Amino acid sequence: PAPVRDEPFRPQLSFSPQRNWMNDPNGLVYHDGEYHLFYQYNPNKDTWGDMSWGHAVSADLLHWTELPLALPVEKDAGGEITQMFFSGSAVVDHANTSGFGKPGNPAMVAMYTAVFPQARTLNGKPIRAGTQAQSLAYSLDRGRTWTQYAGNPVIPEPPGPYAAEYRDFRDPKVFWYEPEHKWVLATVAAQRHKALFYSSRDLIHWEWTGEFGPAGAAGGVWECPDLVELPVDGDPARRRWVLIVSINPGGPAGGSGMQYFVGDFDGKTFTRDRNVASDDARWLDYGADFYAGVTYNDAPGNRRLLVGWMNNWDYAGTVPTAPWRSAQSLPRELGLRTLDGQVKLVQQPLAQVQALRSGLLYSVPARAIAPGVQPVSLNGAANAPLEVRMRLQPGTAARSGIRLGTAGTSAYTEIGYDAAQRAVYVDRTHAGEARFHPQFAARHAAPAVLRDGELPLRVLVDRGSVTVFAGEGETVLTDQVFPPAGPAAVSLFGVDGDAAVRDLDVWSLNSIWKD
Ligand code: FRU
């Protein structure tokens, strides 16, 4: 039987590898009944290195099966790395534009950043030490085994103006651009804060068509771009494009973060809409632990599903988990909504997570929150994972909200609304283990708009993380937490005034590794 993933802090709602180090999600594609999750993986250690593509599959995006490595690091006889496999994407070449497919068996094609630490030649092409180039591999057996394309790399270096950036040219995201029946690729010149766009008829020959940036936050490197088209307010006639860019450091909670831009893509380049109130960054997540997020290709029902790496480069190598390090997030469904006069990205946790609900631990249509801390008596003892839903009415309170802790201990994570700051926040300063990094114990805040005096909150409490979806999903915070194990303890709190909650429900959820 498969070993149960049940160690302290082991995520019970989303994928983490049995052992060793993982970072970015890669190659997210749906094919033939399976959602594929490839990921940056070190097969040999629980810290970053020997970068390979790990692989897992799922029929429902909840329950995962870990498979053998898809693209293993390559080393020479002396043990020196000759090629690593950095982040990238995957498509299914249904029309066999690449010629890699067989009749009735379209190829799954992965485009990844090939990293060459040493100078060498590959397929007759000279490669300088440190090169990051874009290469292809394909699979004819549902992603189980892979063949590297004999003409790699297909984009050996960045376009002319950025030729000097050959060591920081990475993270190709390919997708099918239906209006022109062609493949489009977004990649980055990381240090220059540029997203670069390419087009191809066959996935092999690529033409550079445009660029975007710097814009918004440009403090750190730009990594892992993605470009998705979404209807606005559910109206298929009003569509905008969203460019997603990961930035490290310079995120809203310090270290790694993700920003997005709303605008247009004409098949060649992305242009940001100018009707935004300011040129400030728009953050996709305001917590400390959501990075390198990208969307699925070919998800059924045209759903736009985003998965991010739930960690932060500031401390990812020292988080207190063993024998693995890092989890991917639960997939989130993306949308665009007009809110407060602006078109904003909205996110909701994967709808199927409701199928994990096992028991209603507490439910109240309305409850006042007096100044102080008021425990909520749960019916039954339940460990995380949990789901909490409520509409918080901050009233006259300076701060109000909910504390999620472990019974019999003083550890809790506080999720609240701060009236003076007009912000929703996650405070993990009392949440549990934090000594592994000086900046870990912190409070992370995000702007929040009360509508009719209320702030809807939906919180997924996993072992090892909390994710808060606030408002209509326009504000999300993802934070790792490492609390003592044990049954959940929930309380409501208010400071300097009276608050209330409406429709507070606390559910216990089944583990994806057990049910
Ligand atoms: C982002 C990133 C990518 C790169 C990968 C290497 O976290 O730095 O830019 O491809 O990780 O593991």
Image (cartoon, rainbow, N blue to C red):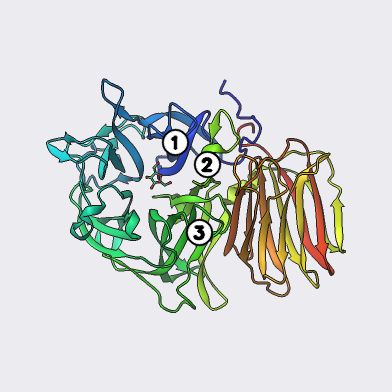
Q: What residue is drawn where x is 59% and y is 58%?
A: 476
The residue tagged with tag 1: helix, strand or loop?
loop
> The disc labelled 1 sits on which kind of residue?
Trp
Asked whether residue 29 is in view, the answer is: no
Which amino acid type corresponds to the residue marked 2 in the rendered image?
Ala
Q: Mark 2 points at which residue?
A: 316
SS under mark 3 = strand
Quadrant for the N terminus, please.
Answer: top right
Residue visible at 73% across and 59% down in the picture: 390
Asked whether the viewer can see residue 489, the reply is yes
Q: Nearer the viewer, residue 313 or 365?
A: 313
Residue that numbered label 3 is attached to: 334
Residue 25, given in percent of the width and then of the height, sits at 44, 43
Q: On the rendered image, what quadrant is the C terminus found in?
A: top right
Residue 506 is tagged as none
Badge 1: few (under 14), some or many (20 or more) residues near its Cα, within 10 Å?
A: some
Quadrant of residue 433 in the image? Answer: top right
How many angstroms separate mark 1 from mark 3 (CA)? 30 Å
